[in-house]
Image (cartoon, rainbow, N blue to C red):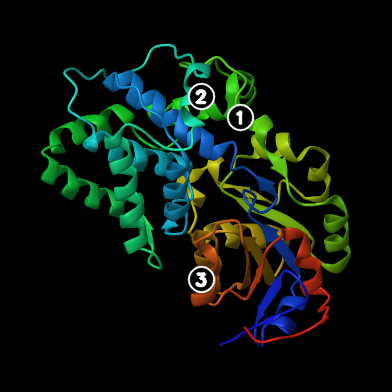
Amino acid sequence: MRYKLLGEGAMVLEGRLDELAEAEAVVFDCDGVLIDSTKSYHLADKIATCVILGELYGVEFFLGEDFEDALRRIEVLGGFNNDWHKTALMIQAISIHLKPPKTIRRDLGRVDVSGYVKRCEVGESSPEEVKTAIDWVRVKAGEMYGRYVDLKFFEKELEEEAEKLGRIEELKKLREALGPLTGYGSGLLTTLYDEIYLGEEGIREKYGSKPRYVSWRGLLDREVVLVREEVLEELLRLLPRGIAMATGRGRWETEKVLGSLTRYFDLDVGVFSADDPMSYEKPSSKILLECSRRLGAGRIIYVGDSFEDLLSARRASEEGLDALFVGVLTNPYSLDLFIEQEADAIIDDVNVLPKILKKEEKFWSPY
């Protein structure tokens, strides 16, 4: 199969343009597509890692751009839609490479998050043991590129590495301390993470409770809306069944960031898997099957930026939904993956999407 360029910023798999143009509805992933969350989620990953290992192990360290590169490599493996899982992986990897501490705490008290932010905004991670751990993750993720890998699978690699380093018992104790990854309040990591990301006000509004560990404003205000209003207006004119969201985010934070743009979506039609991760965690097909059922659409385009988004569309197609996938290039490691996996179309900006639906053939050239 070959790709052709459809004007600037859009590549379409040969033979797919007519099918894409006949879609009844477009369903969007949110992070990396409608909203740029790299300055919120990635920073929350780093801060949570710093806080947990700093407080439990009594170690001071710094996390830089190499940590973010590790996150990007993990994100294209298809099984890390949830940032709790990415953070859990990084915490475990760093812990087994650190020098064994004399004592390990089992829980946190109140934490001054602002004191950790500067440690997560440096160019290079340190000390050397932390860099070694991050490089180990980067190499392992690179070896797994193109395969579906989730946290459970990656943790087997961690256990083998921990055995080599004589740290398997410490790893088991750390996992117990982190707790279940099933929702806010289920364990130390999930609770701390959401408090770092949502902030004190967000925790009160979304969960109706007082934060356990953190009192600060959160990271939501660092997120940037990517989609333009006129693009949403045009999509509604082009699509008989409209537009919706099927995303790993929660509904509360999605509405908070998109603001007035939410009026272009029927939020009751959308699926927000962070609010029910046990039922709708990508790459399960359920997130798209349910959203399409609510839309009443038989053929949809799913617009996402990750391997799990593509897998969700493929699995939904295998179960009878006519689901096409358009990949948005927000990760430096995703282009080759999308081409290899034969995404139906690839765009570098969500705002290019109407050009595909209208079949704007400005120029064609083989890729």
The CA span between labels 2 and 3 is: 34 Å
- Name the mark nearer the viewer: 2 or 1: 2
Tell me which amino acid carries mark 2: Lys
Q: Which residue is mark 3?
A: 336
The CA span between labels 2 and 1 is: 14 Å
The CA span between labels 3 and 1 is: 31 Å
Q: Which residue is mark 1?
A: 219
Say how many tags the image has: 3
The label shown at residue 30 is none
Secondary structure of the residue carrying tag 3 is helix
User: Earlier along the polypeptide chain: callout 2 or callout 1?
Assistant: 2
Q: Nearer the viewer, residue 261 or 135?
A: 135
For the point 31% across and 56% down, the residue is 140
For the point 46% across and 34% down, the residue is 46
Secondary structure of the residue carrying tag 1 is loop
Tell me which amino acid carries mark 1: Leu
Secondary structure of the residue carrying tag 2 is helix
Q: Residue 1: where, in percent of width, then height?
A: 56, 87
Horizontal side, residue 165 vs residue 212: left or right: left
Vertical comparison of 365 with 148: above or below: below
Q: Label 1 near label 2: C-beta < 8 Å?
A: no
User: Earlier along the polypeptide chain: callout 2 or callout 3?
Assistant: 2
For the point 71% across and 60% down, the residue is 349
Tell me which amino acid carries mark 3: Asp
Horizontal side, residue 126 vs residue 84: left or right: left
Q: Nearer the viewer, residue 285 or 145?
A: 145
The label shown at residue 118 is 2
Query: Are there few (<14), some (14-19), or many (20+) residues within 10 Å of tag 1?
Result: many
Q: Residue 281: where, in percent of width, then height?
A: 49, 51
